[in-house]
Image (cartoon, grey):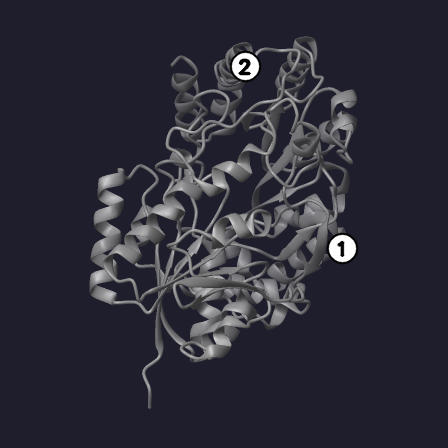
Amino acid sequence: MERKVRVLLVNSPSVNEIRGGGPGFPVEYVKKHHPIGLLYVGTYVRDMGLADVKVLDFDPEISEDKYVSKLKEVVSVFRPDVVGINAFSVTLYDAYEVAKIVKSMDKNIVTVLGGIHTSLYPYEMINQGFIDFLVVGEGEETFADFLSKFGTDQMYYVKGMISKKKNGKYADIITNPPRELIQELDKIPFPDRNLLLDKSVYRNLITPNANQTIMISSRGCPYSCAYCQVSGKKHRIRTPQNVVDEMEFVSDQGYNYVDFFDDTMNIRKERVKEICREIIRRGLQKKLMWKFRGVANLIDEEMVYLMKDSGCDMVYIGIESGSDTVLKSVNRVITTEHCRKAVELMKRYGIKVSGYFMIGFPGESEEEINQTIEFALSLPLDYIQVGIYIPIPNTRLYNEALDEIGGDWFREYTKNPWKNCKFRLHITKVSEQRLIKLQKLFYRRFYMRPSFILRRIREGYNGLSFRVGLKFFLWSLS
């Protein structure tokens, strides 16, 4: 029997990631999650008997020298036939570096890049000399099909892949038809976290004492937010029974906290309620807690009651702005009143709430930014994250901004990434330097107000919020 293909899947380090308009708060210092996409793909092909799989990830604070050394060590010991690398837009430089290093060690190792960026600029990527194949779209079925044909001429003709096939001194680029989205998500095996080579690199300051992992209960998002790369994609769900089956699976692996990483988990309210009921039926709330990302207008009291009873500890809400005019301009389906009602309802049931905010949208005034700050301060939020808006590819606002940001600069970056790259901001009513000052002011005013500190003491969070708040506060003074 021939040996299985040895596959190393690499989560690109973030040493040289593209920076925002300002220095940006290092969110990865607060939380570092399992690379769930790679674990899905790795488990899928392993369970089909197609490959021996390892998943390599890096500490968010690792230096470039150390990640290069670690990568070389793993490649030397494991001797993979195929190295798969995720390609996020912000970490593209290091994704390329990983592929270059692998090829420099052994030119016969096949490099395959996947992730959202392969869908945005596929030909700029496949023409890189160190990239052999691209997975465009969902990876499980496509990568399994590729491995089943590995080593034969047919591996160049896999649906959902773009291939580079040597033809004498040159290479032919082969664009295969796209692969259909996976409709029955319940059929996909639960991602096995034991494929990870090093579990010590993960952390979450918000839940520091929990052994936490992430899950995805649905794929896609039907909304069309003007700033989001994943908006408008077909929404597909796992059944409540299948979701809770995986929660039991991770509990058996020693995890006691699940962070649902769906783009928006509560799009179908009744499904979330049934997940809660299923957790309660099995008594699983006694073994683990959970949190999710949700949209404010689809949170009702019955849902919150069931969430609390089933061990839901926290919800992340995308509030973005305290101005309904700004929310409408970026095509949000929510209003500030939706956000207020949802936050107050969840706090009434003792569920922690973290609010996502963004400043610097096109056309937004400093007065409207201050309105957002005051709105955040008026809500009983436990945490906030504040970003400066950045136009990113495959969004409506990016396309509208092409002239003022110097054309499709991301296409040129994909051809030849450079270090110390910064995102290009919209020309707005508020200058970049002023936006940075307002962002830091936002953090200081939220985390250091006496009413917030007293509330944390009264609610007995054992200093956790102070540690998180202190990091944001110290950063805001930098």
Residue 43 place in picture, x, y as percent: 45, 68
Residue 250 place in picture, x, y as percent: 46, 62
Q: CA distance from mark 1 to mark 2?
A: 43 Å
Residue 272 appears in the picture as rendered: yes
Q: State left or right for residue 218 relative to residue 341.
A: left
Question: Residue, x 72% and y 27% (percent of image)?
Answer: 340
Q: State left or right for residue 393 relative to residue 23.
A: right
Q: Amino acid at mark 1?
A: Glu
Residue pointed to by mark 1: 270
Label 1 or label 2, whichever lies nearer to me, is 2
Q: Amino acid at mark 2?
A: Glu
Image quarter of the C terminus: top left
Observer-nearest of 191 and 15: 15
Residue 287 appears in the picture as rendered: no
Numbered disc 2: secondary structure: helix
Residue 86 place in picture, x, y as percent: 45, 53
**Residue furthest out toward the front:** 169
**What number is the disc on residue 73?**
none
Question: Residue, x 39% and y 54% (percent of image)?
Answer: 129
Observer-nearest of 218 and 406: 406
Up the image or down, 116 lies above or below 38; here it is above
Observer-nearest of 72 and 351: 72
Q: Which quadrant holds residue 273?
A: bottom right
How many marks overall? 2
Q: Which quadrant holds residue 91?
A: top left
Numbered disc 1: secondary structure: helix
Q: Are marks 1 and 2 in contact (CB under 8 Å)?
A: no
**Residue furthest out toward the bottom:** 1
Q: Which quadrant holds residue 180?
A: bottom right
Q: Earlier in the sequence, mark 1 or mark 2?
A: 1
Residue pointed to by mark 2: 432
